[in-house]
Amino acid sequence: MKLNKQDILKALETITVPGEGQNMVESGAITNVVTFADEVIVDITIKNPALQARKKTEVEILQAIHKNVYEKAKIKINVTVDAPEKSAPNVIKGKHIPGIKNIVAVASGKGGVGKSTVTANLAVTLAQMGFKVGVLDADIYGPSMPIMFDVASERPLSTTVDGKSKMKPVENYGVKILSIGFFTKPDQAVVWRGPMAAKALNQMIFDAAWGELDFLLLDLPPGTGDIHLSIMQSLPITGAVIVSTPQTVALADAKKGVAMFQQDSINVPVLGIIENMAYFTPAELPDNKYYIFGKEGAKHLAEDLQVPLLGELPLVQSIREAGDVGRPAAMQTGTPLEKAFEKITQNVVQQVVDRNDNLPATEAIKITTMAGCSAVNKK
Ligand SMILES: Nc1ncnc2c1ncn2[C@@H]1O[C@H](COP(=O)(O)OP(=O)(O)OP(=O)(O)O)[C@@H](O)[C@H]1O
Ligand SMILES: [Mg+2]
């Protein structure tokens, strides 16, 4: 059975909103409907915050779709309560997250340059140094963390914090992890629109029991798009680490990444650049270095942009293999890779310390997105 949005909306038109004399679709309460195969996700905003009102709405939606469209449809309903005075569609306000000291975003312009690999290795190295670390896999379209931490078959449990039920991050190697990958099947392409992706991320941030963290690392998707803006509007980011290979096309995109964080309206400090795949060293010739993507490109970019070079990582088979088996390479004790990640991680920590000594805390920014255009305002 393949559901479609039109049929779902038609079914939802049979439900009237109490006190408004309009149906749910006319009133604008339905903010999004996404269908794939026999599943449907309905986003709805209601004005009545009472739990009962919420439950009633959910039951009405379930019944309307099962009765009018397909009795076996799998339905997920995301209810947002929006009291009238606060209503401002598509605006999510930045919130402070108690207990999380530093949020470090790992970004690049270009895809596939090693953001996720760097995030996983930074995380385990920080944990080994004794820091409390969390990783939020914000790559809603291609989550990597469940595999890189060998927790792909796990699911976050729920826990109660101050009477509220929250998601408990999955934990491995001393690192707490949340990823959209925990909620989708590995072969399921996630075709979400920006607002839904933002909502899922918000849940993983604010409806999760992260506890006390020294560092929450964000593994961002490639590029400089909607998700990045959503994240910056939701989270006060301490600083960004940019990953690039020395290749010209990667550097050009890295430059865009740096510019995005540094623009006036966003103003997230760039902690530095990590040059990944700086050179290739074959296992059998450990002293040979082959600069297959060019030499010192990221180093020159860092000089150019006057941001620190946090270090360089070689292109070696064991980094890829370690990622694939879910045991980050930095955990191979006594190896040059462990040392390399240690040095980079120390540099990141140093930059965070310097940044916190010298700059005021980053505020989450407020971004208003309207169809086709976006205005960015400092909160
Ligand atoms: N230094 C390295 N040596 C060998 N392989 C590496 C290295 N860095 C990354 N890789 C491999 O390159 C591939 C891409 O890396 P990764 O997934 O970390 O990149 P990414 O920037 O997160 O990609 P995406 O943009 O898709 O999120 C992976 O297979 C990873 O194992
Ligand atoms: Mg990635």
Image (cartoon, rainbow, N blue to C red):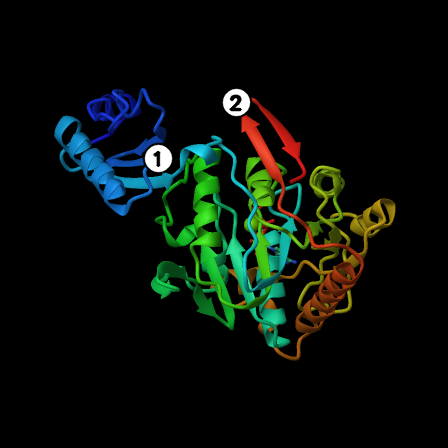
Task: Assign the C terminus to one quadrant of the image.
Answer: top right
Taking the spot 68% from the left edge, 63% from the top edge, the residue there is 282
> Ligand 1 within 8 A of label 1's CB?
no
Secondary-structure class at tag 1: loop
Image quadrant where residue 59 sits: top left
Q: Nearer the viewer, mark 2 or mark 1?
A: 1
Locate residue 294, reporting x and y percent.
Answer: 79, 48
Q: Are marks 2 and 1 in contact (CB under 8 Å)?
A: no
Q: Which residue is mark 2?
A: 371
**Separation (CA) of disc 2 from disc 1:** 23 Å
Q: Report whether residue 153 is seen.
A: no
Task: Assign the N terminus to one quadrant of the image.
Answer: top left
Would you place residue 253 above or below residue 103 in this image?
above
Check disc 2: other Cα within 10 Å, few if <14, some if 14-19, many if 20+.
few
Locate residue 8, reporting x and y percent.
Answer: 25, 26
Image quadrant where residue 165 sits: bottom left
Q: Nearer the viewer, residue 104 or 182?
A: 104
Locate residue 308, reporting x and y percent.
Answer: 81, 55
Q: Nearer the viewer, residue 301 or 162?
A: 162
- Horizontally, residue 79 falls left or right of residue 356, namely left
Q: Report whether residue 145 is seen.
A: yes
Q: Which residue is mark 1?
A: 47
Q: Residue type at mark 1? A: Lys
Would you place residue 154 above or below residue 192 in this image?
below
Q: Residue type at mark 2? A: Ala
Secondary-structure class at tag 2: loop
Taking the spot 19% from the left edge, 37% from the top edge, the residue there is 62
Taking the spot 33% from the left edge, 23% from the top edge, the residue there is 27
